[in-house]
Amino acid sequence: MKLISTISFILFFIQSVSSQDKELDSIKKLVETYSKKDPIRVNLLNQLTKYYTVRDISKSETLLQEAIEISKEINYAEGLGSSYTGYSIFYVQSGNYDKGLIYALKAKKIQDSINDVTGLLLTNNCIARIYIHLKKPNEAIKIQLENLKLFENQPLNPQKAGIHFYLANAYSELSSFDKAEFHYKEAKSIAEKTDFKTGIYIANSSLGVLANRRGEHHEAINYLMSALKFYEDNNQIANIAHTNLELAKSYANSGNINKGILLNNKSIKVYQQQNNLKSLQEAYLNQSSFYKQIKDYQNANRFLEKHYHIKDSVFSYEKQVVIEDMQKKYETDKIKKDKALAEQKAIVIINQEKQNKQYLITALTGVCFLFLISLFYFQRIKAKRKAAFLSLELKETQKRMILEKQYKNSELKSLKAQMNPHFMFNAMNSIQNLVLKGNKNEAYDYLTKFSSLIRENLNMSEKSFVYFEEELSLLKKYLELEKLRFRDSFEYQLEGMEAIEDIKIPSMIIQPFVENAIKHGLLHKTNGLKKVTVSFFQENVFKCIITDNGIGYEASKKINALNNNKKYSFSTKAIKDRLSLLKDYYKLDIGFEYEHVEIGTKVVLKIPYKNND
C-alpha cells in the first residue's frame, strides 16, 4: 500500500550501486577468479550482493552464506558484521522481518564491539526500515536520530542522505507529510553535492510516492518517470518494479486504469521471479482494486484471494516480532478477509445468474448461510484464543508475583541478618563499660541476662515473623539490661499488652527504636529520672508508640551535628528499609513518624501483622 515503506532502497547510501553493468561484470569476474579465503574475498562477496540488491536479490543468499562462513573461519569481525547486515537486507526484501531483525541485531552487536561506525550506519538504516514495515515509525525515528549522532564527526557522503531518507519514510508513516518532504529533499540535496546519482533518483521516486499520498497524481508521474528512466538505463530491476507499482497507482487515480493494470502487471512478474512476498502482496491488492473499478469482478476476486494468501504466510513471521499487536488483529483480519471474499463472490454470482433467477436466489442464500457459519466459527475461535491468551497472561503474572515475593523476603532477611550483630555489639559495649568501672557483680548480672537475651535472639534469628509475646519478651530483657546499666536513674513502662491478640509481627523491629530513644534522648538528659514508655495498639496495622522524657528530637539532632554524626544509626536505617519493603509488599500504611511533644520525643510505628490462623 505504501511504496515508501516497502521499496527496495536499502542501497541508498552505497555509492557503488550507481555503477554501470560493466562494473558489475568486473566484480563477478573477481569473485570467480579470486578464491583465497581471506578478507579480500569476503569484501568482494559482500560487494557483489550490494549490486544484486537492486537487480535480483535472490542471487545474494549463496554469496552471503559463503561470506559468513569465511569470516567466522578467519575471525574477520568487520566482514562478518557486513555479511549479517546483507542477510538482514535479503530477508527484509522478501518480507521476512523477524529473521531480518535477528541478523541486523547480530550485525549491530559486532559493529558496536569494534566501533565500526560505517557498518553501524548501514545496520541502523536496515533496522529502521524493519520498524517502518512493522508500523512502528516512532522506533524508526529513534534509530535514525542515533544515526545522525554517529554521523556528527563524519565527512559529508551518501550515507547521510540515507539517514534523511529513512527519517522521511518514518514521518510519512505518521502522515507527517511536510516533515517527510523536508527530509526527502535533504537527502536529494546531499546526493547532488556528493554526485550520488542513484540517490538523486531514489529521492525523486520517494517524492513521487509522497505526491501520490497527497492526491497530487500528475506531479507524482513527473517524479516517477524521471526515476524510471534512470533505473532502466542502469538495469536496476527491483527499483524498476517498485516504480512501476507506484506509477500504476498514479495513472489509475488519474483515470487511466488500463495503463495502471499494465504497469502493475509488470511489477507482479518481477516480484514473482524474486519471491518478494511483501511487494507482491501489495501489487495483488492494487490489481484487485483496479479490476473492481472496471467491474471485472472475477479478476478482482482472483487477485484479492492471492493477496490474502500471501498475507497469511507473511503474517506467521511478523507475529513473532509484534506479538502484542497481532493477537487481536489476526482474528479481525480473518473475518474482514472472509467478508470481503464473500462480497466479491456474491457480486460475481449476481452478474452470472441474471438469466436464472431461481439459481441466483439459491446461490445467495447458500453464500449468506456459509458466511453466517463462518462468522460464528471465527467468533468462537477468537473467544477461545482470547481465553487462552488471558490464561497465559495470568500464569505469567503469578510467576512474577512469586518471584517478587521471594525477592522481598530475601531483602528483609538480609536486613535483619545485618541488625542482629549490631544489637549484640551494643549490648556487649554496655557490659564492657560496667567492667571498666569495676562493677563486677553488676557486670556478672548483666552478662547473665545478656546471655538469656542472646539465646532468645538466636531462636528468633531465622524467623521473619514472630509472636507478639516473643517480641515483647525480647524487648523486656533488653530494657532490664538498660535498667541495670542506668541503675535507679532509669525506669520503663509497657502498656496495652493485654489488648493485643495472638498475632505475629516482624521480628526485632521495636527494640531498635527503644534503643534510639535511650541513646539519643535519655543518655544526654542530665537531671531527673530518665523514663521511656512503650504503648501497643492493634488496628488494621499493629501500632507501637514510644515516648521518652529526654532532651527531644531537635536537641538530639544538634548534638549529633556537633559530633559530626551525619548519618542515622545503622539499626534505624535498617528498620526504615525493612518497613519500606513491608509497605510495598503488603500495600498498607506502614512506617514510622516523629510527633511533637513538649518534653522528650514521641515516635509512632505502624507495623504489619499476621493473624495466627
Image (cartoon, rainbow, N blue to C red):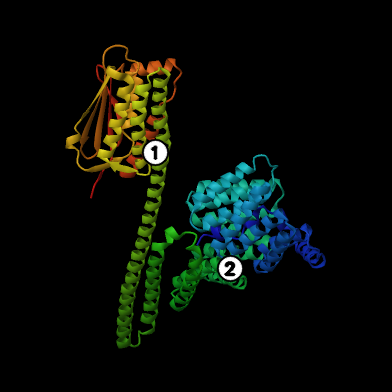
Which mark identifies residue 333?
none
| Rendered position, 156 above or below 197 | above
Report which quarter residue 242 is drawn in: bottom right
| Rendered position, 293 above or below 176 | below
Residue 515 x/y as whole percent: 34, 26
| Rendered position, 486 above or below 459 | above
Along the line of sight, the residue nearer the viewer: 329 or 317? 317
Compared across the picture, whether 327 is left or right of 80 comes to left
Residue 17 x/y as whole percent: 71, 58
Q: Amino acid at mark 2?
A: Asn
Along the line of sight, the residue nearer the viewer: 63 or 185? 63
Badge 2: residue crowd in 10 Å (few <14, some 14–19, many ≥20): many
Can I make out residue 289 in this image?
Answer: yes
Callout 1 secondary element: helix
Residue farthest left in this picture: 499
Can I make out residue 256 in this image?
Answer: no
Q: Amino acid at mark 1?
A: Lys
Q: Earlier in the sequence, mark 2 or mark 1?
A: 2
Report which quarter residue 422 is drawn in: top left
Going 70% across and 51% down the picture, which residue do you hit?
196
Which mark identifies residue 416?
1
Along the line of sight, the residue nearer the viewer: 458 or 362? 458
Residue farthest top in this picture: 527
Compared across the picture, whether 367 is left or right of 10 comes to left
Residue 453 x/y as whole percent: 34, 34
Callout 2 secondary element: loop
Badge 1: residue crowd in 10 Å (few <14, some 14–19, many ≥20): many
The residue that disc 2 covers is 276
Inter-mark Cα distance, 2 to 1 = 63 Å
Compared across the picture, whether 127 is left or right of 448 comes to right
Report which quarter residue 182 is drawn in: top right
